[in-house]
Image (tube, rainbow, N blue to C red):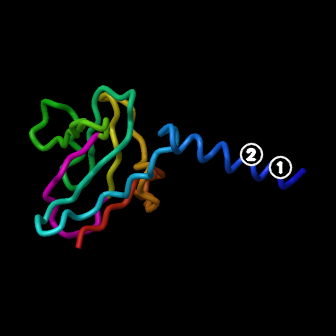
Amino acid sequence: MNKIFVFLCIFWLAGCASLNLVKDRLPPPSPVAGSGEILFQYDFPSARTVSVAGEFNGWEWQSSQPRAIFLKKNEKGIWQAKVKIAPGRYQYKIVLDYQTWILDPYNPYTIDDGRGNINSLLVVK
């Protein structure tokens, strides 16, 4: 019975992968070689807007704010932005549709801001 179950699970996963039901995990924000920029990218298919707010841009997240970082959706439906950020340690969050603040789902590193809020942590070297 266990062998049949394992076979069915493998068969199901292979089928999902061939139908593009299983997506590759995106990497956390990372440096773009030779550019001095950090690449942020996210897979939020139902989002209308995606922005990044953090210590590196004064936590600005609205379109009327000059330092706000808005991502653009590419041809594969992935939201992306390349941003110059000075070396340092920064707290940040992702803002969906101007209202929902979330931790970066692709970045495993978090930090408590000292007031009980947990933020994603970005280290730029």
Could you tell me which residue is drawn at 35 percent across and 44 percent down? Answer: 42
Magenta stretch?
Answer: 79-90
Query: Which residue occupies the foreground of this view, 79 or 65?
Result: 79
Q: Residues within 10 Å of mark 1 (few under 14, many from 20)?
A: few
Residue lying farthest right? 1
Secondary structure category for the residue under label 2: helix
Percent x, y for residue 68?
17, 41
Residue type at the position of mark 2: Leu
Does residue 41 appear to the left or right of 14 in the view shown? left
Quadrant housing residue 91: bottom left
Residue type at the position of mark 1: Ile
**Marks 1 and 2, how far apart at CA:** 6 Å
Does residue 100 appear to the left or right of 29 in the view shown? right
Query: Which residue occupies the foreground of this view, 95 or 116?
Result: 95
SS majority, magenta: strand
Quadrant housing residue 33: bottom left
Compared to residue 42, the image places residue 91 above or below, namely below
Percent x, y for residue 15?
59, 41
Query: Which residue occupies the foreground of this view, 64 or 20?
Result: 20
Number of marks: 2
Percent x, y for residue 112?
45, 58
Secondary structure category for the residue under label 1: helix
Percent x, y for residue 47?
35, 29
**Does the magenta segment cover residue 88?**
yes
Could you tell me which residue is drawn at 13 percent across and 36 percent down? Answer: 65
